[in-house]
Amino acid sequence: MITTKIYIKPHLAEYVVSKFGTPDGFIRFPDSLDIYHVIWDLTERRPVRCRPDDGNVEIILPDRSIGKAPETYNYISRKSQRIISRYLENIFLTELHAFVFDEKHRKGNPYNESVYRFICRYEIESITEDALKKNCYRWINRFQKRQKRAYGKQNILTV
């Protein structure tokens, strides 16, 4: 088991640790998820003069029977870390929106309570409930039909 540390946003780190964390404190992504293959594609040989890994999460590198050996390809560059971070943020927001939508339309819970339950479910403390609620409202407003404004001619009374 070869691991490496990467830096992602604190609320994503809490989400990933809660969802994919192992009892040892590492993050193990199942090979059925796309993020597993994204990480496998982004690993590369460690440069000669490279600083030790630093970050707020430690992930277990994919170990496949064919292809890159994690003993050799165990480095994730800063650019690759940003790609992984964006991918994890998409996973986070997708699950948040699906959870809130399901809670609202199937169970009848208000958005405030749904977002709060999501935060409690994944033990997220580094982002506020209001920030996630605003994100959900922005997402919902994208799909609602917009009403056309009535810019017709006004009736002007002439004397």
Image (cartoon, helix red, strand yellow):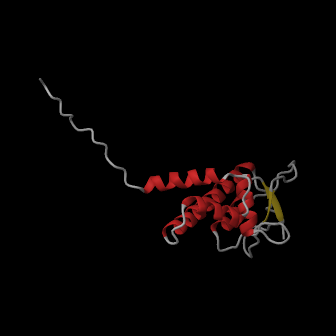
- Please give the name of the residue rendered at 72% of the width and 53% of the height, measured from the top-left corner: 81
Residue nearest the viewer, comparing 41 with 82:
82
Residue 138 visible in the picture? yes
Q: Position of residue 66 (x, y in %)?
A: 72, 74
Q: Position of residue 68 (x, y in %)?
A: 75, 67
In the picture, measured across the screen, residue 33 lies left or right of residue 156, that is right
In the picture, measured across the screen, residue 159 lies left or right of residue 33, that is left
Tell me if residue 12 comes above or below residue 102 in the rendering: above
Residue nearest the viewer, comparing 64 with 80:
80
Count of numbered tags: 0
Q: Residue furthest bottom?
A: 65
Q: Residue furthest front?
A: 159
Residue 40 visible in the picture? no
**Image quadrant in which you'd find residue 26:** bottom right
Residue nearest the viewer, comparing 108 with 119:
108
Q: Residue furthest left?
A: 159
Q: Position of residue 49 (x, y in %)?
A: 87, 48
- Please give the name of the residue rendered at 56% of the width and 63% of the height, measured from the top-left corner: 100
